[in-house]
Amino acid sequence: MGKNIVQSKRLRVKVALPEPPVRTLWWDGKELCLLDQRVLPGRERVLRLKTAASVYQAIRSLQVRGAPAIGVTAAFGVALEARRFKSQGVKVMRRKAEQAIELLEKARPTAYNLFFALNRMKEVLSNSERTPEKIMTALVSEAEKIYLEDLRSGWEIGLWGKSLVKPGMNILTHCNAGGLATSGFGTALAICYAAWNDGIRFHVYVDETRPVLQGARLTAYELQKAGIPCTLICDNMAAFLMSERKVDLVVVGADRIAANGDTANKIGTYGLAVLSRWHQIPFYVAAPLSTFHPEIATGLAIPIEERDPDEVTTITGKRVAPKGVKVYNPAFDVTPGRLITGFITERGIIRPPYPRSLSAIFRKG
Ligand code: MRU
């Protein structure tokens, strides 16, 4: 990681951090720029989005994905729409921004960060100023603030979590909870980056993560770029590796966490948690507080996204199953809180019993 300082002059809160390992998304003053995650690792293509509809499409199609990155992107989507209608006066501008929020709320159902970010944009819109220029400034500032807060959370998750990484360890991760899934530092991978930066040497097993292969395409890409040794495995190999004592620590990200610690994350995470318990391997979830949804008591209330059957019948566009076969494609599963050793957050590592430890964090605000 470089030594550059990431700052926004417009914000009251100064955020001084090293440059993140990847540049997932950025606001250039007029457009939202996104690294297109559908075409990685083959191509590093930047998309330049100008409308809420294009942001909605980018989220739905996984051009941008990962809970925190989805939230930040949606916040900028609202600002983009307000910008588009700025010349038509306050009333039109507000209505268009409200419609953008309604549209973006429907982009994906599981990641709580989306709703966290859009609720903040709603609040700014309802309190905001009376001239188009001032509304615009307020919306862009809030989106930038959400972006920078997420950047800082990732960095801090890394600082807390690196204490769990010991020299020579083999860490297993699932899906992509890296810089690409956030404003830049990641959650599970933030821990790897922070430990590596401190000179701790270890190795990461990367689950390929079918059906869309976020592990193979994105996590392997990020770790290679950072020079962290990693080995790609198919999802069904984890049990065997564990039985051979080749895994010392499992760290994954999260899409939504209920008050009792039940955690939705990429399909396959629950299986890893069960396997980790059987093999007595610590199983940690790394997530910013914007992923926690303390108003829901258990994981039963978490909506699970079902995605297009084509994701299962094809691999990177190539058909691997007979036409017409019936498919079930839930994108996430829920790991019971009682299988989770700890939550690594920007406020520290939270340990069980969860209803109590998590509510203490949220009581403090
Ligand atoms: O469908 P995706 O790629 O958006 O799913 C992403 C995950 O499940 C990640 O593990 C999660 O969002 C955490 S990202 C820090």
Image (cartoon, helix red, strand yellow):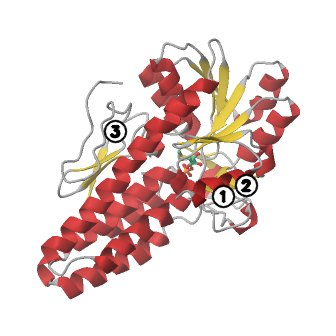
Question: Which tag is nearer the camera, tag 2 or tag 3?
Answer: 2
Residue at the limit of the structure toward the front, as seen here: 364
Q: Nearer the viewer, residue 292 or 234?
A: 292
State the mark number for residue 84.
none
Residue at image coords 78%, 23%? 241
State the mark number for residue 356.
2
Residue at image coords 54%, 30%? 191
- Whether label 3 lies within 8 Å of ligand 1 gets the answer no
Residue beneath label 3, please? Answer: 23
Query: Distance from label 2 to label 1 (Cα)?
Result: 5 Å
Residue beneath label 1, please? Answer: 359
The x, y position of residue 305, in whole percent, is: 63, 63
- Badge 3 amino acid: Arg
The x, y position of residue 163, in whole percent, is: 59, 25
- Badge 2 amino acid: Arg
In the rendered image, the quadrant that contains the N terminus is top left
Question: Which tag is nearer the camera, tag 1 or tag 3?
Answer: 1
In the image: residue 358, left or right of residue 226: right
Do callouts 2 and 3 mark residues in contact (Cβ within 8 Å)?
no
Query: How dense is the environment of label 1, judged by Cα within 10 Å: few (below 14), some, or many (20 and up)?
Result: some
Figure check: 124 above or below 207 = below
Q: Regarding mark 2 in the picture, which secondary structure is present there?
A: helix
Q: Nearer the viewer, residue 241 or 299?
A: 299
Do callouts 1 and 3 mark residues in contact (Cβ within 8 Å)?
no
